């Protein structure tokens, strides 16, 4: 895609604008950016924990809040954020205009709560940029052809940032957040996790989809498709963070890029399922029809003509799956259906995992030394994931990270430590 020189998209997350003081600090940061960037589009998430608060509010008034009303409610957080930032910028003498997704033509499909961006009509944005204004856009939301307001799923402002950057042919999409870049683990669990100076899109996608919350995997996918470099960096400083772009694999420097974890998952087990063609298709087709995505699937034989199917899904999808699970049991597709919410997933990610023998064994050994039992294992070219009891998760992340990162006496080339 043709790049527009001097155009940058900066996305600020809720953690970066959690208070009026932080909104002012971000406005000052944007003003400083204008010394080096000609045209600036800013995508903003809701302030602090606003979205969590709105979800909690919905649950207070409804047993199963969802659909268009839920999206209309959730989308309100971002509107507060953009307008507040717009006021702060104007107060600093920076010409700025704040726009909702509807006002700047971010079209999505009609899947409430988990909508996908289909197109962005950039005319309004371009017009405002031509007029010399900073354009501030609500993240996380879109509008359907029938004028319904939708949301893109939790963490979806990253997706808006990436899609806007792709549509405008931006030079870069800055993901401005509360950490210094993409690290070898969540610094909340591993305070001395390392920051990578650069990595490939593939590495970022794998890290993000296995739980590194710092970037939404779809944002990295969009930027990869359109060749937009991503710069994950702190909104609290002007320091460089992690550049994600083609050909920047850190495979040559380290076997494992990161240890990720996901506590918000649940395990479903279908016992004594008939072992015949079509059963798995039936089960997973029904879940797909309900827009439920599955993170890991294991099928094993339990006896001669019976099988056991286990799958891991995001906790937020469990309620939506319950109806199907109850019916499968009633129709005797399975003799029993077990739901375990006290599980968590820990993964190691690296471009060379598939081709470097022994890395998975080192992960399993580190867990075994701590007496942590592994419930399920799955592996792919770039990832080994283990499901364990959620109460062990924090300890598990620490020991697995130590296994792969403490053994090296010196930081490897191209890698800076956190805060560097
Ligand atoms: P924002 O509000 O900016 O969107 P998020 O809370 O969504 O921020 O993501 C940033 C958080 O991601 C960090 O505070 C950090 O705790 C967490 N995180 C998890 N894994 C990683 C990782 N590998 N590298 C950096 N941060 C990570
Ligand atoms: N405000 C939304 C959320 O909390 C979107 C985002 O943060 O990216 O999920
Ligand atoms: Mg986020």
Image (cartoon, rainbow, N blue to C red):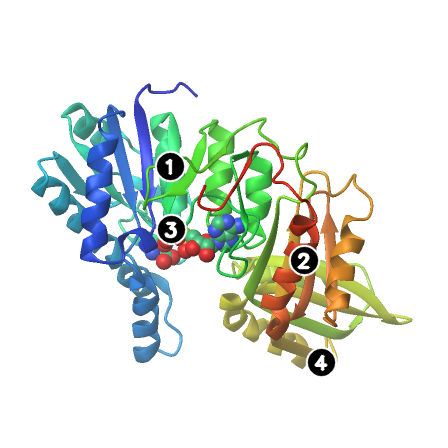
Does the Cβ of the disc 3 residue fall within 8 Å of ligand 1?
A: yes
Q: Residue at x 16, y 51 (%)?
A: 84
- The local crowd at label 3, few if under 14, some if 14 to 19, many if 20 or more residues have their Cα within 10 Å, is some
Q: Earlier in the sequence, mark 4 or mark 3?
A: 3
Could you say which disc has been placed on residue 336 in the image?
A: 4
Is the C terminus in the top left, top right, bottom left or bottom right quadrant?
top left
Report whether 388 appears left or right of 75.
right
Q: Which of the two marks, 4 or 3, is nearer to us in this view?
A: 3
Dot 2 falls on a residue whose secondary structure is helix
Q: Residue at x 56, y 53 (%)?
A: 185
* C-alpha gap between disc 3 and disc 2: 24 Å
- The correct choice, above or below, for 91 with respect to 286 in the image is above
Could you say which disc has been placed on residue 178 in the image?
A: 3
Q: Which of the two marks, 3 or 1, is nearer to us in this view?
A: 1
* C-alpha gap between disc 4 and disc 3: 44 Å
* C-alpha gap between disc 4 and disc 2: 34 Å
Q: Which of the two marks, 4 or 2, is nearer to us in this view?
A: 2
What residue did someone put label 2 on? 400
The spot of residue 96 in percent (x, y) is 15, 37
Q: Earlier in the sequence, mark 4 or mark 2?
A: 4
* C-alpha gap between disc 2 and disc 1: 29 Å
Q: Earlier in the sequence, mark 2 or mark 1?
A: 1
Residue 328 or residue 184, whichever sits in front: 184
> Quadrant holding ligand 2?
bottom left
User: Image quarter for residue 293?
Assistant: bottom right
């Amino acid at each position: 895609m043709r790049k527009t020189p001097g155009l940058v998209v900066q996305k600020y997350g809720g953690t970066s604008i959690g208070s009026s003081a932080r909104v002012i600090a971000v406005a000052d940061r944007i003003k400083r950016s204008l010394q080096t960037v000609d045209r600036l589009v800013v995508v903003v998430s809701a302030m602090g924990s606003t979205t969590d608060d709105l979800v909690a509010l919905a649950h207070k008034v409804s047993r199963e809040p969802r659909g268009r009303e839920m999206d209309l409610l959730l989308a309100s957080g971002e509107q507060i954020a953009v307008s507040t930032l717009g006021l702060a910028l104007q107060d600093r003498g920076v010409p700025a205009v704040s726009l909702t997704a509807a006002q700047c033509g971010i079209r999505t499909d009609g899947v409430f709560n988990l909508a996908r961006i289909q197109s962005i009509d950039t005319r309004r944005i371009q017009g405002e940029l031509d007029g010399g204004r900073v354009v501030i856009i609500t993240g996380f939301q879109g509008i359907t052809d029938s004028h319904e307001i939708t949301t893109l799923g939790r963490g979806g402002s990253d997706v808006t940032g990436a899609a806007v950057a792709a549509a405008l042919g931006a030079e870069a999409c800055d993901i401005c957040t509360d950490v210094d870049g993409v690290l070898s683990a969540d610094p909340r669990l591993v305070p001395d996790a390392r920051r990578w100076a650069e990595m490939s899109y593939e590495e970022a996608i794998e890290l993000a989809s296995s739980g590194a919350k710092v970037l939404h995997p779809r944002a990295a996918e969009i930027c990869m498709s359109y060749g937009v470099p991503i710069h994950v960096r702190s909104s609290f400083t002007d320091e460089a963070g992690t550049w994600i772009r083609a050909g920047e694999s850190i495979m040559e420097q380290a076997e494992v890029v990161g240890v990720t974890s996901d506590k918000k998952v649940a395990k479903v087990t279908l016992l004594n399922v008939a072992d015949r063609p079509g059963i798995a298709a039936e089960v997973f087709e029904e879940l797909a029809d309900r827009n439920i995505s599955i993170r890991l699937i294991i099928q094993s034989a339990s006896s001669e003509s019976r099988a056991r199917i286990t799958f891991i899904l995001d906790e937020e999808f469990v309620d939506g799956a319950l109806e199907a699970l109850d019916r499968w049991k009633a129709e005797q597709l399975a003799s029993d259906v077990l739901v375990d919410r006290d599980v968590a997933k820990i993964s190691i990610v690296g471009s060379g995992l598939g081709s470097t023998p022994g890395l998975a064994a080192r992960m399993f050994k580190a867990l075994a030394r701590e007496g942590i039992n592994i419930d399920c294992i799955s592996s792919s070219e770039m990832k080994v994931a283990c499901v364990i009891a959620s109460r062990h998760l924090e300890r598990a992340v620490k020991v697995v990270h130590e296994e792969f990162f403490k053994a090296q006496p010196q930081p490897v080339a191209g890698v800076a430590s956190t805060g560097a």
